[in-house]
Image (tube, rainbow, N blue to C red):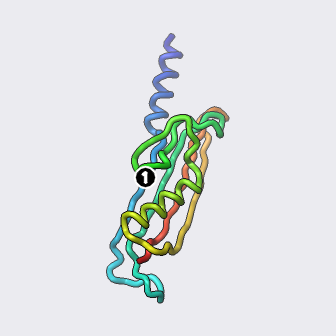
């Protein structure tokens, strides 16, 4: 009984700590410094992070939402490069009236938490919105 209770508490703690979430952070401060010689001015630098918890490395349990910042999805594989890039470009277009993106970069990482049972996956995409 104690082992079962301990396992449940550990599982709940892992879900709380590594819960999937989508995060969008922006910085419109460039100190009037142009980024390149083109006519467009930088509007903001945008960073999107999507995290997820997976069972056996491929079955999604708790992942970041592909629709909104700060929300999660259950049993849906949303932690993909396509979804992160979609959020990046949507934020640039709707929040900053951007007409072009510059310097888009991405980074993907995975970590197995318990040997071959659960894994944590993260995708980060960033770029500069230009007007």
Point 39% across, 47% down: residue? 70
Evaluate whether residue 27 shows in this view. Answer: yes
* Image label count: 1
**Quarter of the rendering occupied by the C terminus:** bottom left
The answer to which of 97 and 53 lies nearer the viewer is 97
Q: Residue 102, position in %: x, y?
A: 51, 74
Q: Residue 57, position in %: x, y?
A: 65, 39
Q: Residue 130, position in %: x, y?
A: 43, 76
Q: Mark 1 points at which residue?
A: 23
In the image, residue 21 above or below residue 125 = above
* Mark 1 crowd level (few <14, some 14–19, many ≥20, 10 Å Cα): some
Point 38% across, 74% down: residue? 43
Evaluate whether residue 18 shows in this view. Answer: no
Q: Which residue lies furthest to the top in this view?
A: 1
The answer to which of 95 and 5 lies nearer the viewer is 95
In the image, residue 45 above or below residue 20 = below
Q: Relative to residue 42, is residue 54 drawn left or right?
A: right
Element under label 1?
A: strand
Point 45% across, 31% down: residue? 13
Q: Residue 98, position in %: x, y?
A: 42, 72
The answer to which of 7 and 41 lies nearer the viewer is 41
Q: Indicate the quadrant where residue 105 lies.
A: bottom right
Point 35% across, 70% down: residue? 28
In the image, residue 41 above or below residue 108 = below
In the image, residue 42 above or below residue 6 = below
């Amino acid at each position: 009984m104690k082992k079962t209770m301990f396992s449940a508490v550990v599982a709940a703690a892992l879900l709380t700590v590594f819960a999937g979430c989508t995060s969008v952070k922006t910085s419109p401060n460039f100190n009037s410094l142009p980024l390149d010689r083109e006519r467009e001015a930088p509007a903001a630098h945008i960073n999107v992070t999507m995290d997820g918890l997976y069972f056996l490395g491929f079955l999604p349990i708790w992942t970041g939402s592909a629709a909104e910042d700060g929300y999660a999805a259950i049993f849906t594989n949303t932690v993909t490069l396509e979804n992160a890039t979609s959020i990046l470009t949507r934020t640039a277009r709707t929040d900053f009236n951007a007409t072009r993106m510059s310097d888009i970069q991405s980074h993907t990482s995975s970590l197995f938490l318990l040997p071959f049972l659960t894994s944590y996956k993260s995708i980060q995409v960033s770029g500069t919105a230009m007007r």
